[in-house]
Image (tube, helix red, strand yellow):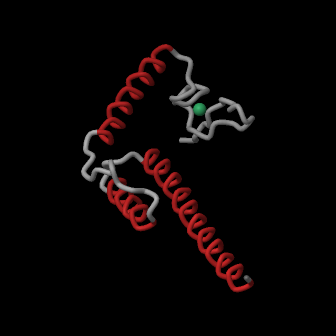
Amino acid sequence: MKMVQCKFIKKDGRQCLAQAIKGQDYCLWHSQSEQIKKLRLSKAQIGGFRRRKYFNVPTENLTGLELRDIENCSKVLEIVVRETYEGRMSPQKANAVTGAVKMLMESVEKTDLLNRVKKLEEVIKDGRD
Ligand SMILES: [Zn+2]
């Protein structure tokens, strides 16, 4: 049977790519039929329950871990990979943590470089005096 594309136009002006419900103009997510709205709500609730599973098992505690340290940042990334891979951390949380840790690592590296330059400048200055 031929697939009918959902006729919904998204905010960015592009048409929804999902398959329309059989005999209707819109997909499950864009249908305005009361029956489908109810079904959509129940599916969203199931999705909500599924999402919650991510929040219940913090197997490795990061509280108190000094994060202005490259090795500890690497440890956090390692934990995120493992927790996400094994389904204990949501991909959203993993993305947020990974992004933040990456910024921390860059900041630590920059601070370290700056301190090295300062030391070099002092050595040069002392040599001149
Ligand atoms: Zn749609």
Q: Is residue 42 above or below residue 125?
A: above
Choose between 95 and 34: the one closer to the eye: 95
Choose between 11 and 93: the one closer to the eye: 93
Residue 117 % position (x, y): 65, 74
- Specify the farthest residue to the bottom: 127
Which quadrant would the C terminus be assigned to in this image?
bottom right
- Specify the farthest residue to the front: 129
The quarter of the picture where residue 8 lies is top right
The picture quadrant for ligand 1 comes to top right
Residue 37 % position (x, y): 48, 19
Q: Is residue 49 left or right of residue 99?
A: left
Q: Is residue 96 above or below residue 103?
A: above
Please state the total of marks drawn on the protein image.
Answer: 0
Q: Residue at x 33, y 59 (%)?
A: 82
Q: Is residue 78 left or right of residue 12?
A: left
Q: Residue at x 56, y 18 (%)?
A: 32
Q: Is residue 111 above or below residue 45?
A: below
Choose between 29 and 81: the one closer to the eye: 81
Q: Is residue 87 left or right of residue 41?
A: left
The quarter of the picture where residue 72 lies is bottom left
Choose between 92 and 103: the one closer to the eye: 103
Residue 42 % position (x, y): 38, 23
Q: Residue at x 27, y 46 (%)?
A: 58
